[in-house]
C-alpha cells in the first residue's frame, strides 16, 4: 500500500483554493496595490487565516488538507513572485476559452464581469517571459510550508495528510525569450522543480495543478498533430520537474478552467487520460461531479489505471451552490470503487473554490463547508457498503452447501419418469438447456396420477405439476417437484 491509498475507509480531500477571509483580502489588496502596509501584521493575518481554514476542513471531515492557497492572490501574481524572467503585460488581452466564449458571447461577457476574473483583489495581467527563467520563491514557499504544517499539527493531522499545490510548467506565461517551445519548457521544468522539491523535502504531499492540458485540445489554430505534440511536451516537462520525488508523494490535478457556464467546448476525459496517467504521480484528480463530465466514469471500464495509483474524482462540484446529497456522493464513489478498487478512490471536489482572491466567490463560503460535510457523510456511506460487502459475500457463499444438500435429499423414486423430449437441461431438450423453459407437455403426458388421487387443498404447498422450473446461474433447469412433508397429499407419501 502507498501512503495515498485507502486501508479501511474512503478518504476525503479537496483541490486546494478556498475563500480568503475579508481581513486578509484587505491586507492583500493594500500590499499588491502599492499602498502602505505592515508586513509583520500581514504575516500574522495570513498565519491566523491558514490555521482557521485548516481547522474548518478538519471539522468538516476532510482527511487530506491544505492551506487553501490563501497566500496566493492569483495565478499571474504567483508566477511573477516566484519566477524570474517574466514581466506583466496589461496591454495584452487574455484569450481564454475562445471557442466557448465565441459560442456564448453574451453570457460570458456578463459572467466574467461578475465571476472568475471579475472582482479580483489584484488585477489580472498576462505575464511574458523576457529573460532566463529562474526560481526565486524560496521564502514564499517556506512560509506556506510553515503555516500549513503548524495548522495541521494543531489539529492533529499528520504530515502525510497535508498537501500544497504548485503550478505545472504548462501554464507559465507566454514565451518571447527562448528559441523553441521545447527549450522554454525545459527551462521552466528546471526552475519550478525547486518548489516541488521544497514541498516534498518538508515531508508533505506536492500537488501539481494543470488546467492547461485540457484547454490545449480546444485551442484555436492547432491541428491534432500539434495538440498531441504539445501535450507530450507538457507531460515530459512535468515529469522532469518531478525527478527525484517518489510518485506516492505527488498528486496531479487537472480541470477545465471555467466554473459555471454551458461548457460545451472543452475536452473529454478520454482525450487527455493517456497523458494524465503518464505523469509520475500517486493520485490523479479530475472533474466528475458536473453534468458535462459525470458520465465519464465509464472510461475506466476499459482504461487500466496503473498499479497502486489512486483516482480522486470530483464528487462535489465547485460550479453550483447546491449541496450534493450524501447518498448521491456515495453512489459516485461506488462507481469508481467498483472499477478500480476501494483502496484506490479518494473522494474529492471538481476544482478549487477560489482560484483567484475574491471578495465574492461563486460558491458561498458557508455552502462550501456544507459540501465538505456532505462529502464526509457520503464517504462514510460508501465505506460501510464497500468494507461490509466482502463479509456479506462470504456468509452467502457459506450457506450454499446446505441448500444443495436439501435438494439432494428429495427422493425422485416417488415420481414417474419425465415425459419424452423434456430433459434436465440437456442439449437434446427444446432449447438445448438454455433460455426459457420449454413448452409444457400435453395434458395426456401429465395425467400420470390416479383419478382417485386427492387434489391438494388450498393450504398445501405441494406443486401440482410434474415438473418445476428453476433459474440457476442464468440458465433454466428442470427440478423434480418438491413439497414440504407436512403438506404433501397423503396419496403421495
Image (cartoon, rainbow, N blue to C red):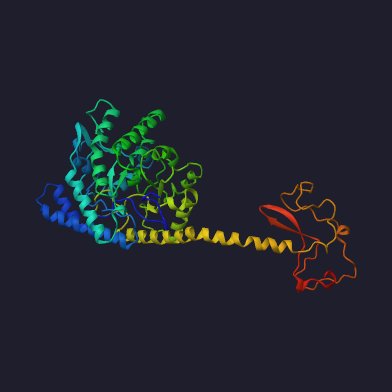
Residue 75 position by quadrant: top left
Image point (27%, 53%), residue name: 68
Image position, residue 180 (x, y; %): 28, 26
Task: Name the quadrant containing residue 243.
Answer: top left
**Residue sticking out furthest to the right:** 451
Q: Picture coordinates of residue 9 (x, y %)?
A: 42, 58
Depth check, front residue: 71 or 190: 190
Residue 124 appears anywhere in the view: no
Foreground residue, 144 or 178? 144
- Is residue 149 found left or right of 62 in the rendered image? left
* Circle count: 0
Quadrant where the C terminus is found in the figure: bottom right
- Please indicate whether residue 270 sits to the left or right of residue 355 in the image: right
Residue 387 visible, this orientation: yes
Q: Return the residue nearer the eye: 356 or 446.
A: 446
x and y, in percent, of residue 473 in the image: 66, 53
Residue 2 coordinates in the image, percent (x, y):
38, 49
Report the residue at 48% width, 57% height from top.
386
Judged left or right of residue 383, residue 125 is left
Q: Which residue of the protein is positioned furthest toward the top in this rendering?
A: 179
Q: Nearer the viewer, residue 144 or 104?
A: 144
Residue located 27% across and 31% down the image: 186
Amino acid at each position: 500500500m502507498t501512503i495515498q491509498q485507502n486501508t479501511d475507509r474512503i478518504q476525503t480531500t479537496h483541490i486546494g483554493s478556498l475563500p480568503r477571509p475579508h481581513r486578509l483580502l484587505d491586507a492583500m489588496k493594500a500590499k499588491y496595490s502599492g499602498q502602505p502596509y505592515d508586513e509583520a501584521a500581514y504575516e500574522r493575518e495570513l498565519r491566523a487565516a491558514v490555521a482557521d481554514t485548516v481547522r474548518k476542513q478538519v471539522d468538516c471531515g476532510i482527511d487530506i488538507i491544505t492551506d487553501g492557497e490563501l497566500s496566493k492572490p492569483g495565478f499571474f501574481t504567483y508566477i511573477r513572485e516566484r519566477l524570474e524572467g517574466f514581466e506583466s503585460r496589461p496591454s495584452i488581452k487574455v484569450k481564454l476559452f475562445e471557442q466557448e466564449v465565441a459560442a456564448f458571447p453574451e453570457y460570458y461577457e456578463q459572467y466574467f464581469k461578475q465571476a472568475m476574473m471579475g472582482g479580483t483583489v489584484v488585477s489580472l495581467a498576462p505575464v511574458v517571459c523576457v529573460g532566463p527563467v529562474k526560481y526565486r520563491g524560496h521564502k514564499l514557499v517556506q512560509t506556506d510550508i510553515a503555516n500549513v504544517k503548524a495548522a495541521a499539527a494543531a489539529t492533529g493531522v499528520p504530515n502525510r495528510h497535508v498537501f500544497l499545490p504548485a503550478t505545472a510548467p504548462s501554464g507559465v506565461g507566454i514565451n518571447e525569450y527562448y528559441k523553441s517551445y521545447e527549450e522554454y519548457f525545459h527551462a521552466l521544468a528546471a526552475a519550478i522543480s525547486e518548489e516541488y522539491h521544497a514541498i516534498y523535502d518538508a515531508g508533505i504531499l506536492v500537488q501539481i495543478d494543470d488546467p492547461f492540458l485540457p484547454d490545449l485540445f480546444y485551442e484555436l489554430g492547432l491541428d491534432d498533430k500539434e495538440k498531441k505534440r504539445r501535450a507530450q511536451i507538457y507531460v515530459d516537462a512535468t515529469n522532469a520537474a518531478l525527478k527525484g520525488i517518489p510518485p506516492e508523494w505527488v498528486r496531479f490535478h487537472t480541470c477545465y478552467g471555467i466554473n459555471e457556464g454551458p461548457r460545451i467546448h472543452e475536452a473529454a476525459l478520454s482525450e487527455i487520460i493517456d497523458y494524465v496517467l503518464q505523469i509520475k504521480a500517486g493520485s490523479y484528480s479530475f472533474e466528475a461531479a458536473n453534468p458535462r463530465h459525470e458520465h465519464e466514469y465509464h472510461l475506466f471500464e476499459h482504461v487500466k489505471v496503473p498499479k497502486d495509483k489512486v483516482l480522486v474524482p470530483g464528487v462535489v462540484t465547485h460550479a453550483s451552490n447546491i449541496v450534493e446529497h450524501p447518498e448521491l456522493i456515495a453512489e459516485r464513489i461506488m462507481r469508481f470503487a467498483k472499477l478500480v478498487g476501494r483502496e484506490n478512490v479518494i473522494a474529492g471536489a471538481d476544482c478549487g473554490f477560489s482560484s483567484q482572491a475574491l471578495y465574492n466567490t461563486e460558491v458561498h463560503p458557508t455552502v462550501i463547508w456544507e459540501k465538505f460535510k456532505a462529502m464526509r457523510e457520503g464517504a462514510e456511506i460508501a465505506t460501510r457498503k464497500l468494507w461490509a460487502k466482502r463479509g456479506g459475500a462470504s456468509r452467502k457463499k457459506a450457506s450454499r452447501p446446505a441448500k444443495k444438500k436439501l435438494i439432494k435429499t428429495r427422493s425422485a423414486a416417488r415420481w414417474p419418469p419425465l415425459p419424452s423430449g423434456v430433459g434436465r437441461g440437456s442439449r437434446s431438450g427444446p432449447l438445448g438447456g438454455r433460455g426459457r423453459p420449454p413448452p409444457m407437455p400435453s395434458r395426456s403426458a401429465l395425467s400420470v396420477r390416479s383419478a382417485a388421487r386427492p387434489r391438494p387443498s388450498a393450504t398445501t404447498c405441494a406443486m401440482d405439476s410434474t415438473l418445476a422450473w428453476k433459474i440457476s446461474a442464468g440458465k433454466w433447469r428442470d427440478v423434480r417437484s418438491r413439497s414440504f412433508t407436512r403438506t404433501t397429499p397423503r396419496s403421495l407419501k
